[in-house]
Image (tube, helix red, strand yellow):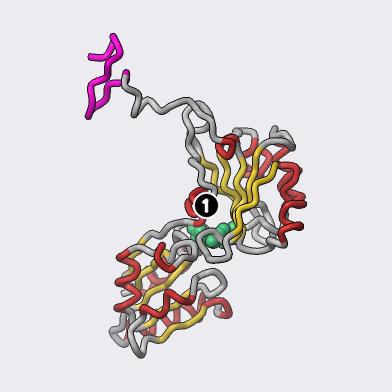
């Protein structure tokens, strides 16, 4: 059996209880060493074969899983954040399907959630935005044309932009082309939840300059949108006048 496990954004206590138990029971752990906190491996049992996949190909990763399976062993495939976001797990699952190897997925705390927590901010503010756009700039890996940054920016929803810390000038240009003003709020969250986390508040127009001054290069989340400024209408859910399934409101039209 292969367990895909979300390692969380970095802090060792931000993995799920289930993920931690799976690590403790694994015979083989294949971890994405570029971003997964290696301290998580201290919970592995003695003799567990822990392999950093940063230097491995998909074929090598799957071959190791298949060998473990043939030997009746349990494998944990540890991905940073949540495996469903830029985790490249689909291609692994497809090959495991072809080989008839069973697997499951344990979710994790994605870095976009850890970045909001670092601010701290709420993506979905009443009257401001009720939508979060998770995306990335096109780099060496292309992004479908229908999802180009300027088209997504036109929604002016809350945005969490992954994998783009090296493309901040281009990002600003696309956001502005899409309708943001250079003065609209933005933030760079570097290594959210790690001991050396940095939160840099800035504007759409100053993203590149802010990153340069702070020396924040890799492993950064870019947040964009009015939600960063706070200030919102209050929610109906906790409004005294509003009736819902669990509470009767005081408004005259409440039934
Ligand atoms: N599956 C992961 C994302 C992997 S892609 C998740 O759910 O978070 C790698 C990108 O994620 C990085 O380029 C960066 O944009 C973001 N990232 C990962 N960990 C981060 C962290 N601790 N702080 C800020 N951004 C992070």
Position in image of residue 164 (x %, y %)? 66, 55
- Considering every residue shown, the one lying at the far top of the view is 252
Establish whether ligand 1 lies closer than 8 Å to the Cβ of label 1. Answer: yes
State whether residue 94 appears in this view: no
Dividing the image into four quarters, tell me where ligand 1 lies: bottom right
- Considering every residue shown, the one lying at the far front of the view is 195
Q: Taking 194 as reference, is 180 left or right? A: right
Q: Residue at x 48, y 51 (%)?
A: 113
71 w.r.t. 205: above or below: below
Position in image of residue 74 (x %, y %)? 32, 79
Q: Which residues are magenta?
A: 241-255
**Closest to the observer, 38 or 78:** 38
Quadrant housing the N terminus: bottom left
The reply to whether the magenta stretch includes residue 134 is: no
Q: Quadrant of residue 55?
A: bottom right
At numbered mark 1, what does the secondary structure look like: helix, strand or loop?
helix
Which residue carries the number 1 mark? 118
Q: Taking 25 as reference, is 4 left or right? A: right
State whether residue 128 appears in this view: yes
240 w.r.t. 196: above or below: above
Quadrant housing the C terminus: top left
Q: Residue at x 66, y 52 (%)?
A: 137
Q: Residue at x 57, y 47 (%)?
A: 160
């Amino acid at each position: 059996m292969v367990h895909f496990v979300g390692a969380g954004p970095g802090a060792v206590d931000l993995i799920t209880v289930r993920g931690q138990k799976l690590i403790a029971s694994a015979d083989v752990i294949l971890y994405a060493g570029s971003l997964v906190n290696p301290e998580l491996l201290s919970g592995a049992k003695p003799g567990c074969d822990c392999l950093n996949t940063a230097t491995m190909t998909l074929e090598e990763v799957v071959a190791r899983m298949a060998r473990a399976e043939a030997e009746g062993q349990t494998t944990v495939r540890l991905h940073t954040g949540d495996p469903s976001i830029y985790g490249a797990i689909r291609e692994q699952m497809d090959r495991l399907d072809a080989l008839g190897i069973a697997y499951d997925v344990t979710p994790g705390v994605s870095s976009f959630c850890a970045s909001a927590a670092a601010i701290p901010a709420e993506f979905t503010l009443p009257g401001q935005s009720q939508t979060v756009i998770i995306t990335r700039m096109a780099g060496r890996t292309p992004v479908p044309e229908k999802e180009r940054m300027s088209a997504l920016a036109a929604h002016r929803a809350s945005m969490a932009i992954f994998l783009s810390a090296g493309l901040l000038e281009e990002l600003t240009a696309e956001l502005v082309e899409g309708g943001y003003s250079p003065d609209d709020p933005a933030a760079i969250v570097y290594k959210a939840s790690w001991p050396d986390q940095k939160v840099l508040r800035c504007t759409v127009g100053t993203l590149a300059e802010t990153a340069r001054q702070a020396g924040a290069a890799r492993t950064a989340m870019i947040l964009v949108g009015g939600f960063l400024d706070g200030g919102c209408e209050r929610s109906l859910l906790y409004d005294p006048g509003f009736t819902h399934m669990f509470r009767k409101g005081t408004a005259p039209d409440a039934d």
